[in-house]
Image (cartoon, grey):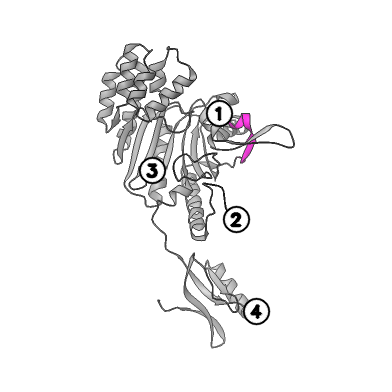
Amino acid sequence: MSAWVLPDHIADVLPSEARHIEELRRLYLDTARRFGYELVMPPLLEYLESLLSGSGRALDLQTFKLVDQLSGRTLGLRADSTPQVARIDAHLLNRLGVTRLCYCGPVLHTRPDRPFATREPLQFGAEIYGHAGLEADLEVIELALTSLDAVALRNVSLDLSDARIVPALLAGVSLGTDVRDALHQALASKDLTGIKELAKGLPVHIQNALIELVQMYGDVSVLSLAEKTFAAWPGILKSIQELRHIANAFKHVYTTFDLADFRGYGYYSGVRFAMYVAGTGDALVRGGRYDEVGAVFGRKRPAVGFSLDLKELVTAVPAQPLKAAIRAPWGVEGDLREALAQLRSQGETVVCSMPGHESEVDEFNCDRELVHLAGKWVVRDLPHP
């Protein structure tokens, strides 16, 4: 095997795309800051028990593990930043009121989470801690929609679900962990045959409710159907009311519902959402409420947030024009160096051509050139090709 071949689903990012991703990173951090979110930078690796605390088996399977040669303990390379941010909120900041935090950094996955996905996403996220009301859910969704709008993504659809529905249906029934996990998977994949088989031993009214649930996806009429089906479960009716409230708050966005959606990590404890853009396939944004995520750190706080992969996002946003630049000769003459420095201090990109070489760049459009005329250096336009 050639020394330069990278592992499957790991790739270099080349100049123009790398610059575009970096511009998105800056834009999104600035957007979050305008909403009042403070930037944190959790470490790429930490002790495994802290990294996976409260996150569930799915995140464990996605986490690379290694041994720390200083302590002999097992370390993990983060597959998701939310447990780390919950730790920061609980132990390092330890504030009493509302805390808004954002982050952007690489995460690593042992396997791609879908076909053709990278195993090294660049995860941007924003999270609110300390407020249990729907106001926090609404603000997080608004920030996510604003972030997509900031990069001119149109035809965004919002898909809503709630992680409390299935636990409420299964409350008080005895199910092994493997059976429960299999049932969740069958619900997520809309496997009606599998659901019927797995639910055989449950009370008939719960079996019927699960069969109805898997078919509850579509427009707002799904909520009316759910209210009739789950009339005997007050907790589920409350969840449905919250979903309706959120949908009403974003009437300008095309909204759908999938009440059996179990995709993503297992720490969600309330309203969940995903955002799609026409022509991009899988969701670009996923988020929701996860009030239990900080409990293992000794500080259970209401929490809601979202995340997205900037490497995936960059493939969906409109192509950016090349940055305008000035082509200049390379030299050490004082007046030339002064002219170059002045142009760069004004924010211009100046690319110096090395002697004997044409400048080969993919990221810049050299539409002007620096030339020496009448004893001074001046910038003139280049003819269009």
- Residue reaching furthest to the right: 70
Report the amino acid beneath label 3.
Leu
Decide: marks 2, 1 in contact (CB < 8 A)? no
In the rendered structure, find residue 145 and report the number of the disc placed on it. 3
Task: State how far apart marks 2 and 4 are (Cα).
Answer: 42 Å
Mark 4 is surrounded, within 10 Å at the Cα level, by few (under 14), some (14 to 19) or many (20 or more) other residues, namely: few
Residue 163 visible in the shown view: no
Pinpoint residue 179: horizontal percent, then vertical percent.
45, 20
Residue 189 belongs to the span the image colors magenta:
no
Q: Which residue type does callout 4 highlight?
A: Gly
Q: Which of 365 and 100 is in front in this view?
A: 365
Q: Which amino acid does label 2 sit on?
A: Trp
Q: What element carries label 3?
A: helix
Q: Which quarter of the picture shows residue 186?
A: top left
Judging from the image, what secondary structure is the residue with disc 1 in? loop
Q: Which of marks 1 and 4 is nearer the N terminus?
A: 1
Single out the mark in the foreground, 1 or 4: 4
- Do labels 1 and 4 touch, CB within 8 Å? no
- Contact check, label 4 and label 3, Cβ < 8 Å: no
Mark 2 → mark 1, Cα distance in angstroms: 51 Å
Q: Tag 2's secondary structure?
A: loop
Q: Mark 4 points at which residue?
A: 334
If the image is split into quadrants, where does the C terminus sit? Answer: bottom left
Q: Earlier in the sequence, mark 1 or mark 3?
A: 1
Q: Name the residue under label 1.
A: 96
Q: Specify whether 163 is left or right of 230.
A: right
The crowding category of the residue bearing disc 3, from other C-alpha atoms within 10 Å (few below 14, some 14 to 19, many at least 20), is some
Q: Tell whether 249 sits left or right of 94.
A: left
Mark seen at residue 203: none
